[in-house]
Image: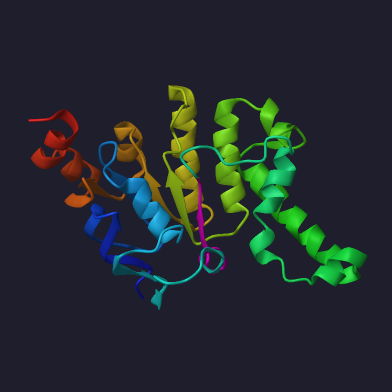
C-alpha cells in the first residue's frame, strides 16, 4: 500500500510556477521533512495536500486513494491533519475548547439531536472530552487546560496547535514550521514530542522546518526544494551536505 505520494505536483499563480514537478512518497510511521529557503514552495505543498489549493498539475494519493480533487473537509475525515505557520487558534476560548474543535470531524449527530441534547449526543460529548483529555495528558498541558489561549506563553500556543491537530486522530499530521519562535529548550522538547507522536501514537509526520538541527534530530528522510523544484532527497546527512542544497541556502 502507498501510504502517501505526491506525483509530479505543480502549482501556478498567474503564470508563476511556485511548485514544479515535485514527486515523493512517505511511508507509514515515517518522519519526513521538507526543507528549503524562504519562498521555496514548502507551505504551498502543504496547502495542496490539505486541499486549500488545487494542484494545476500532478496527483496526490493517500492510502492508495486519489485525493487530488477532494474537498478540505474530506481530507480531514480521511485522517490528514495540519498545523499552520502562523498560530490559528481561538484566542478568547480556553485551551480545552480549542482542542474540542479538533473533534468536529468525528461529529455525526444531527442538528436537532444536538439542540435537544439526546442521550446519544451526551455519550458522544463524553467521548470527545475523553479524547481531548488524553491529548492534554500526552503533551503535558494539564496546567493550561482551562486558561484562555490569549493568556498562554507563545511556546505553549505552538504546542496547543499541535494538540488540536492530534485531537482529530489523524494517521498523517503536517507540521508547518512548528519550532518557529521557540527558544532552544522548547525546540528540544518539540523534538521529543515529534518522536512520541510517531512512536507512541503511530502517526506519520510530514514536517516543514527551517531549524536544521531539529530536522537532523527527528527526520528519517528529507526532501530539499528551491524555487518549487526538487534539489535532493535522502537521509538528513545526505541532503544537508548536498552541494546544491548548501548553495541554495548560502548562495554561490
Whether residue 159 sits left or right of residue 122 in the image: it is left
Q: Residue 158, image x and y in percent?
A: 54, 35
Whether residue 100 sits left or right of residue 34 in the image: it is right
Range of magenta residues:
75-83
Q: Tell me: residue 8, above or below residue 151.
A: below
Q: Residue 100, image x and y in percent?
A: 71, 51
Whether residue 3 sits left or right of residue 141 in the image: it is left
Give 185 or 99, whichever is nearer the viewer: 99
Q: Tell me: residue 101, above or below residue 107.
A: above
Q: For residue 80: magenta?
A: yes
Q: Residue 215, image x and y in percent?
A: 32, 39
Residue at x 34%, y 72% (from the top left corner): 2
Whether residue 10 sits left or right of residue 70 in the image: it is left
Q: Residue 109, image x and y in percent?
A: 78, 71
Residue at x 24%, y 43% (from the top left corner): 236
Residue at x 32%, y 47% (from the top left corner): 42
Give 123 or 35, whichever is nearer the viewer: 35
Q: For residue 188: magenta?
A: no
Can residue 210 be seen?
yes
Q: Quadrant of residue 20?
A: bottom left
Amino acid at each position: 500500500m502507498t501510504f502517501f505520494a505526491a506525483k509530479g505536483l505543480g502549482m501556478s499563480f498567474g503564470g508563476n510556477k511556485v511548485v514544479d514537478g515535485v514527486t515523493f512518497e512517505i511511508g507509514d510511521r515515517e518522519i519526513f521533512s521538507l526543507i528549503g529557503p524562504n519562498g521555496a514552495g514548502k507551505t504551498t505543498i502543504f496547502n495542496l495536500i490539505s486541499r486549500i489549493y488545487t494542484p494545476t498539475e500532478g496527483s496526490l494519493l493517500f492510502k492508495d486513494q486519489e485525493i487530488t480533487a477532494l474537498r478540505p473537509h474530506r481530507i480531514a475525515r480521511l485522517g490528514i491533519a495540519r498545523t499552520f505557520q502562523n498560530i490559528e487558534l481561538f484566542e478568547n476560548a480556553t485551551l480545552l475548547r480549542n482542542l474540542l474543535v479538533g473533534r468536529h470531524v468525528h461529529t455525526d449527530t444531527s442538528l436537532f439531536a444536538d439542540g435537544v441534547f439526546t442521550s446519544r449526543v451526551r455519550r458522544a460529548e463524553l467521548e470527545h472530552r475523553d479524547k481531548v483529555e488524553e491529548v492534554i495528558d500526552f503533551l503535558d498541558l494539564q496546567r493550561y487546560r482551562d486558561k484562555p489561549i490569549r493568556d498562554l506563553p507563545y511556546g505553549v500556543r505552538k504546542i496547543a496547535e499541535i494538540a488540536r491537530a492530534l485531537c482529530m486522530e489523524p494517521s498523517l499530521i503536517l507540521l508547518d514550521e512548528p519550532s518557529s519562535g521557540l527558544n532552544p529548550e522548547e525546540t528540544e522538547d518539540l523534538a521529543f514530542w515529534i518522536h512520541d507522536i510517531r512512536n507512541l501514537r503511530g502517526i506519520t509526520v510530514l514536517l516543514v522546518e527551517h531549524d536544521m538541527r531539529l530536522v537532523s534530530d527527528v527526520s528519517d528522510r528529507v526532501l530539499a526544494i528551491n524555487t518549487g523544484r526538487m534539489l535532493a532527497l535522502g537521509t538528513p546527512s545526505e541532503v544537508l551536505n548536498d552541494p546544491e542544497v548548501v548553495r541554495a541556502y548560502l548562495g554561490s
